[in-house]
Image (cartoon, rainbow, N blue to C red):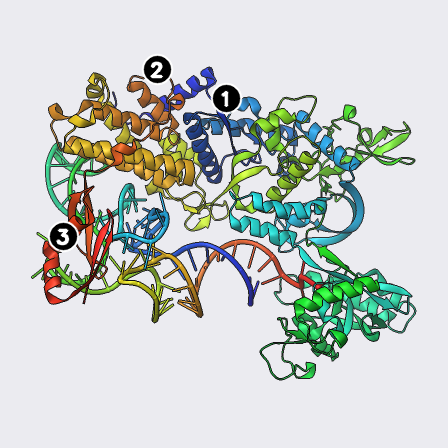
RNA sequence: GCGAAAGUGGCGGAAUUGGCAGACGCGCUAGAUUUAGGAUCUAGUGGGCAAUCCCCGUGUGGGUUCGAGUCCCACCUUUCGCACCA
């Protein structure tokens, strides 16, 4: 027997045992409840980093804990295997194909995950770049195409000049590429979109089903979807004999509209100015604004620039002619790309009107001001509540009343309609890169774009391709791929050559795990709904909008296709914090990277897992500490020594603990044991606070050491020691799966500790005969007394008054009041 | 600018419902063991003080309460999200 834990030998032994006994196979006992725990699958970059170690350790503790609690647990793993790094690596190294690179990386990372002791059911492994997976990604696309949820349109899109592909709005952060940080350009291109806007309302409403999500994330999604209730109003354009439609949330201020603004990209700009003396000036201005956007994108508050078009619109509420401007502060992408400007009640309009000397007309009077608002005298716009002025028959109505009344009147008059507007745009999924799932569409001169029929799926990604990025899909140059026949009429036709955004691949993988080998369907409803929705999902906050919004959208689409009864994919979501070193995120450029490989080699998997779970609660950032790792290692060895050094004692122990024969110290230890079981059970099962769960196991370990140190071996209660040893091993098992297997075997058990039953605590054992009552004087602790746990209030107060350190306070002042909190404290209020 | 979260020893963190602030770990101090070091075990460790008494102490200032790290108000700092969204 060694006095230190020989982790290499033990890990090797149990890895083999687990593999041979198929220990982590997904349970299917019909008498047990099902539990689905999932960590976001990784991009197979080739190596695990500490962030991976953290998120997978968290998921593994939950999976192992739930199994011991008697659940069938689905705990799968897979690979988000399409994407740019594979191509970039291939380009950089020259002689390796993205597919080969990806599959090599997967094999390598899988070994590392196994070495960490992660309990995945590898029979359900899913790889998005595998043909049997992306066949169904394509299938979903064709279904959505046939249901008008996938469509093609030309629009201004975001272009990353470094990745040489378009990006979805969600993938642009601060006007830069979410992946590589390069500033994005705008390009006018025809691209494929998924109609996520059709689901905007449901994505928003169903947040109410997500009590198990952080409020912060729901708020971020809410802001992203950006619902605003307002109205569309038509202003007349006499010159064109057309209407100019604007969106406004403040129809109550219609009488205060003193000018209109068009986005420079608005189609009417040309129509209104063509052939006039303003034409040239306007054209120059539009060009300037388009250029300026690029230059000024980093500045917080860009200056409002505008130009009068020479044209006028007619305000439908009072038939007044008001000038039409174009300006940089109105965006084509929101609303109708045109606004009515109410400078008195909108700060942006106010600034603009002041700059270009346009009339400011107040129409809302604040309740608390006696003097009537006058546009000329205002210093800033007034956006608050009040009652209407200068608004004809609507005067004196409140803002709210006026909104409803005007909406009603003007709807009847025919120039207004109530409408909800969203900031959310449709999801652009075309990518001009090689390593992705080809969009399964064929273009036929006669039939137009046609979806590839199910029996012809997958549209296979050709292997031999020159994939250096050129701004166009590399597939364009592969004639054998491009040239095909129309599935409908059989005429020669061309394939779509763009591939899909990898976020499409990851929008449904969590359903495929439930039925990973299905060759006829992406999955059956029966198999998905056996596990769905995911009970606990764990991943990085950076996906708060991207992946999580897309996954929710897909789930609703799948629901509408009647492939699941559920409308939300993830019941509970834990956003785990980052792993930092020296206060900063680990990165090669900062040179502060700690490689999990080194930690595993030096301390073993259990220590690495234990430290990373102990150092910080899971949702907070974690500061890496080499000393902290040593502490975790020390603790595991302490447990190792406790069990191995007391094996003779434990082996001779028979029967169960008889509480009645325990002496005082033994009783205390027995109670601590049950308190620890309770604490760990609640911390792991309900609060997901693994750091405090581990500290509770440490405390119990300390207590048993102190019990053993304080007495000679002949009056040690062997049965109690055995009970404590077994419980420490059981409680520790989800955190440190290897050492606990070995110790469980030492303790004389034949099966795996991970198949043992999670210990239960005894409420009876937690009760104390005697409790400590704190005695306060005016809220400050002055003394403590011990009383019987069932002592009545009068008895406790009596004893409190008699406490030694209280006497001087009682003598020096008058007792006014006594507060008694049962089983906790007595507070004497003395003046 | 708007919104959210956070601020506790030398460090990571705990205090779950308004009731003993600092659990647990790191670090540090002393002792035991050892030829020595390491490892291990024991005791101590918020600040002030000779003290087990006492005073102070959870970002700052106020408030509510018998009692506040916890609740309320104002402010400061940090982090995150949004930022011409009509």
Give the x, y percent position of residue A660: 17, 27
Relative to residue B55, is residue A98 depicted above or below? Answer: above
User: Which residue shows up at 71% across the image and 55% down it?
Assistant: A420
Lateral position of residue A320 relative to residue A345, left or right: right
User: Does label 2 or label 3 sit earlier along the sequence?
Assistant: 2
Q: Are marks 3 and 1 in contact (CB under 8 Å)?
A: no
Give the x, y percent position of residue A258: 76, 75
CA–CA distance in space, label 2 to label 3: 57 Å
Label 1 neighbour load within 10 Å: few <14, some 14-19, many 20+: some
- What residue sits right under mark 1 in the picture? A27
User: Which residue shows up at 62% across the image and 25% down it?
Assistant: A526
The quadrant of the image that shows the N terminus of chain A is top left
User: Does label 2 or label 1 sit earlier along the sequence?
Assistant: 1
Q: Secondary structure at mark 2?
A: loop
Relative to residue A478, is residue A594 depicted above or below? Answer: below
- What residue sits right under mark 2 in the picture? A750
Lateral position of residue A569 relative to residue A595, left or right: right
Q: Name the chain letter of the residue that bears numbered label 2.
A: A
Q: Secondary structure at mark 1?
A: loop
- What residue sits right under mark 3 in the picture? A798
Lateral position of residue A268 relative to residue A160, left or right: right
């Amino acid at each position: 027997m060694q006095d230190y834990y020989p982790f290499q030998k033990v890990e090797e032994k149990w890895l083999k045992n687990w593999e041979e006994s198929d220990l982590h196979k997904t349970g299917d006992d019909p008498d047990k409840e099902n539990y689905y725990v999932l960590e976001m699958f990784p991009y197979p970059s080739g190596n695990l980093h500490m962030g991976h170690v953290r998120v997978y350790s968290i998921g593994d503790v939950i999976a192992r804990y739930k199994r011991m609690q008697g659940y069938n647990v689905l705990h799968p793993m897979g690979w988000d295997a399409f994407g740019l790094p594979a191509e970039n690596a291939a380009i950089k190294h020259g002689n390796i194909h993205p597919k080969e690179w990806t599959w090599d990386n997967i094999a390598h990372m899988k070994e590392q995950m196994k070495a960490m002791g992660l309990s995945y059911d590898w029979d359900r492994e899913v790889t998005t770049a595998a043909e049997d997976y992306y066949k169904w990604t394509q299938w979903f696309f064709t279904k959505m195409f046939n249901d008008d949820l996938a469509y093609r349109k030309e629009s201004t899109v975001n272009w990353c000049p470094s990745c040489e592909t378009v990006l979805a709005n969600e993938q642009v952060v601060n006007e830069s590429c979410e992946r590589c940080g390069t500033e994005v350009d705008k390009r006018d291109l025809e691209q494929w979109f998924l109609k996520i806007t059709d689901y905007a309302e449901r994505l928003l409403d169903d947040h109410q089903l997500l009590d198990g999500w952080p409020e912060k994330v729901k708020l971020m999604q809410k802001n992203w979807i950006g619902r605003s209730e307002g109205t569309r109003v038509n202003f007349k354009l006499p010159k064109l004999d057309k209407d100019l439609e604007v969106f406004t949330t403040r129809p109550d201020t219609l009488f205060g509209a003193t000018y209109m603004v068009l986005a420079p990209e608005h189609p009417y700009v040309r129509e209104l100015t063509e052939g006039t003396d303003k034409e040239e000036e306007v054209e120059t201005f539009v060009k300037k604004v388009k250029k300026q956007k690029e230059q000024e994108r980093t500045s917080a508050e860009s200056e409002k620039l505008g130009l009068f078009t020479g044209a006028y619109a007619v305000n439908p509420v009072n038939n007044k002619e008001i000038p039409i401007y174009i300006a940089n502060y109105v965006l084509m992408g929101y609303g109708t790309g045109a606004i009515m400007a109410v400078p008195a009640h909108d700060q942006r309009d106010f600034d603009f009107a002041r700059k270009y000397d346009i009339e400011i007309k107040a129409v809302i009077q604040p309740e608390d001001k006696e003097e009537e608002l006058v546009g000329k005298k205002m210093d800033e716009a007034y956006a608050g509540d009040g009652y209407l002025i200068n608004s004809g028959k609507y005067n004196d109505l409140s803002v709210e009343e006026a909104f409803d009344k005007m909406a009603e009147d003007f709807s009847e008059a025919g120039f207004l309609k109530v409408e909800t507007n969203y900031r959310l745009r449709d999801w652009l999924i075309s990518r001009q890169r090689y390593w992705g799932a080809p969009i399964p569409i064929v273009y036929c001169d006669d039939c137009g774009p046609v979806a590839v029929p199910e029996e012809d799926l997958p549209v296979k990604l050709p292997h031999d391709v020159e994939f250096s990025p050129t701004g166009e899909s590399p597939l364009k140059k592969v004639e054998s791929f491009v040239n095909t026949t129309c599935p409908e009429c059989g005429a020669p036709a061309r394939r779509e050559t763009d591939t899909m955004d990898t976020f499409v691949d990851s929008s449904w993988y969590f359903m495929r795990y439930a039925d990973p080998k299905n060759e006829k369907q992406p999955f059956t409803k029966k198999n998905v709904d056996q596990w769905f929705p995911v009970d606990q999902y764990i991943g990085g906050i950076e996906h708060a909008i991207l992946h999580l919004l897309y996954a929710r959208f897909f789930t609703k689409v799948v629901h509408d296709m009647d492939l699941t009864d559920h409308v939300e994919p993830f019941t509970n979501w834990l956003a785990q914090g980052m792993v930092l070193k020296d206060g900063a995120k680990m990165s090669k450029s900062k040179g502060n990277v700690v490689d999990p490989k080194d930690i595993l080699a030096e301390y073993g998997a259990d220590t690495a897992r234990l430290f990373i779970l102990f150092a910080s609660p899971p949702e907070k950032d974690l500061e890496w500490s080499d000393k902290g790792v040593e502490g975790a290692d020390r603790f595991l060895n302490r447990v190792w020594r406790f069990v191995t050094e007391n094996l003779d004692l434990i082996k001779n122990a028979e029967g169960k603990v008889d509480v009645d024969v325990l002496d005082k110290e033994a009783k205390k230890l027995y109670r601590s044991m049950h308190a620890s079981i309770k604490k760990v059970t609640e911390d792991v099962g309900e609060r997901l606070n693994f750091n405090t769960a581990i500290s509770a196991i440490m405390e119990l370990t300390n207590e048993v050491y102190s019990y053993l140190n304080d007495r000679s071996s002949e009056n040690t209660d062997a049965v109690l020691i055995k009970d404590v040893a077994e419980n420490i091993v059981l409680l520790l098992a989800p955190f440190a799966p290897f050492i606990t297997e070995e110790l469980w075997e030492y303790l004389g058990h034949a099966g795996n500790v991970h198949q043992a039953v999670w210990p239960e605590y005894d409420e009876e054992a937690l009760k104390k005969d005697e409790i400590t009552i704190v005695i306060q004087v005016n809220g400050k602790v002055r003394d403590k007394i011990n009383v019987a746990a069932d002592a009545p209030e009068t008895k406790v107060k009596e004893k409190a008054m008699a406490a030694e350190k209280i006497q001087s306070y009682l003598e020096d002042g008058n007792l006014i009041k006594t507060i008694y909190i049962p089983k906790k404290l007595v507070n004497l209020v003395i003046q």
